């Protein structure tokens, strides 16, 4: 899983915690829903400028992923373009080839044929979902989005065709209802959820490699027995504020059956495609539950140096796991 921002994960790894997991169909699906941040006049994070958040003012090392609805001869046909906020609705789409035919064969990557990300334009609400595919190539999954406004849907997949490359295609989704825009959470270096503490050290640099280190602890002690989730210890989704340029990557190497990560630190080398503010969502699994940590970072500023934390938590969450043992509904 790799597109857009070039982030190469290293160290046999884990990922970080915050939020929860939202499972539908055949997957455990992380969810982050931040509480409404402070109103504009009281929040410390400024609205992204074109130079900061839109990706137009910095150097682009590679074309970011998720900004196009068609690429490499494939297109995302989003059949559900509008839903009602707060109401459970079916989200459906089709991936089409250059002849307009529905794609029905995919390479499995990290145990799934396709990874679906849904994020609000303000990057306050985040979903990592795994829809089911019908024989005719139609993908579908029930989804409930908490707030009205604009969302971006990302389909991350690799066609089964020989020589095909991984693609991330994006399309807009609207959630109707009373719209109240929210501010992007301020830069933060720590996240806490359900007794886990996660610390982010390092920073992003436009056009240059930077190192990000994540340390997970609980009750003041390092977590050293993380479990594999979707074939890896750690997962990362990075979204650029403004245009929502996308990346989803995993640590190098995959754990063996029953393996646990010695932890408690995972390290990524990351190259931001431009200056700006980025929202990072990092997942790990521990004691049968998937957790997602959300961080706001600015490319060009080391997170450890800022020492800043958000006025509101970087994400709050509710959790549902439909395919994990011990989680009934």
Image (spheres, helix red, strand yellow):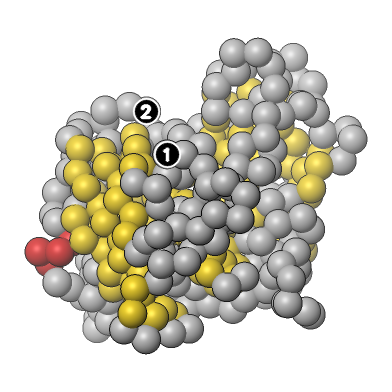
Earlier-in-chain disc, 1 versus 2:
2
Which residue is at the front of the view, 198 or 126?
198
At x 26%, y 56%, the residue is: 213
The percent coordinates of residue 313 (x first, y second) are 36, 79
Quarter assignment of residue 274: top left
Instruction: Name the foreground residue: 163 vs 289.
Output: 289
Say whether residue 255 is left or right of residue 89: left
Residue at the (46%, 53%) spot, across then down: 234
Expressed as whole percent of the image width and height from the top left, the position of residue 205 reads 17, 43
Q: Residue at x 65, y 67 (%)?
A: 22
Q: Quadrant of the C terminus?
A: bottom right
Task: Tell me how far mark 1 sits from mark 2, CA to CA.
Answer: 22 Å
Q: Is residue 315 left or right of residue 301?
A: right
Residue at 44% x, 72% y: name it.
18
Residue 111 x %, y %: 66, 43
The answer to whether any part of residue 288 appears in the image is yes
For the residue pair 241 and 237, the one nearer the viewer reads as 237
Quarter of the image where one finds residue 107? top right
The residue beneath circle 2 is 63
Task: Name the image quarter holding residue 207.
Answer: top left
- Would you place residue 209 above or below residue 232 in this image? above
Label 2: state its secondary structure.
loop
Please give the residue where the numbered disc 1 appears in the rendered image: 252
């Amino acid at each position: 899983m790799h597109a857009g921002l070039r982030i190469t994960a290293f160290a046999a790894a884990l990922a970080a915690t915050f939020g929860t997991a939202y499972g539908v169909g055949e997957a455990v699906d992380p969810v982050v829903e931040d509480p409404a941040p402070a109103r504009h006049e009281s929040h410390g994070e400024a609205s992204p400028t074109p130079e900061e958040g839109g990706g137009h003012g910095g150097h682009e090392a590679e074309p970011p992923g998720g900004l196009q609805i068609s690429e490499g001869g494939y297109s995302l046909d989003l059949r559900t373009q509008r839903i009602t906020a707060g109401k459970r609705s079916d989200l459906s789409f089709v991936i089409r080839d250059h002849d307009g035919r529905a794609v029905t064969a995919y390479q499995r990557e990290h145990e799934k044929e396709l990874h679906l990300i849904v994020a609000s334009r303000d990057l306050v609400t985040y979903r990592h979902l795994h829809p089911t595919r019908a024989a005719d190539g139609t993908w579908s999954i029930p989804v409930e989005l908490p707030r009205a406004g604009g969302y971006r849907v990302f389909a991350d997949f690799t066609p089964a065709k020989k020589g095909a490359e991984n693609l991330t295609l994006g399309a807009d989704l609207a959630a109707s209802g009373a719209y109240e825009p929210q501010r992007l959470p301020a830069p933060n270096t720590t996240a806490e959820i359900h007794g886990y503490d996660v610390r982010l050290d390092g920073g992003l640099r436009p056009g240059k490699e930077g190192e990000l280190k994540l340390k997970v602890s609980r009750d003041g002690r390092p977590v050293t027995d993380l479990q594999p989730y979707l074939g890896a210890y750690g997962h990362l989704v990075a979204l650029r504020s403004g245009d929502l340029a996308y990346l989803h990557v995993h640590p190098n190497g995959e754990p063996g059956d029953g393996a646990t990560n010695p932890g408690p630190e995972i390290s990524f080398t990351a190259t931001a495609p431009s200056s700006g503010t980025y929202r990072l969502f990092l997942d790990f699994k521990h004691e049968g539950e998937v957790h997602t940590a959300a961080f706001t970072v600015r490319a060009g500023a080391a997170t450890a140096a800022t020492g800043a934390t958000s006025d509101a938590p970087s994400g709050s969450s509710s959790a549902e796991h439909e395919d994990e043992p011990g989680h009934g509904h």
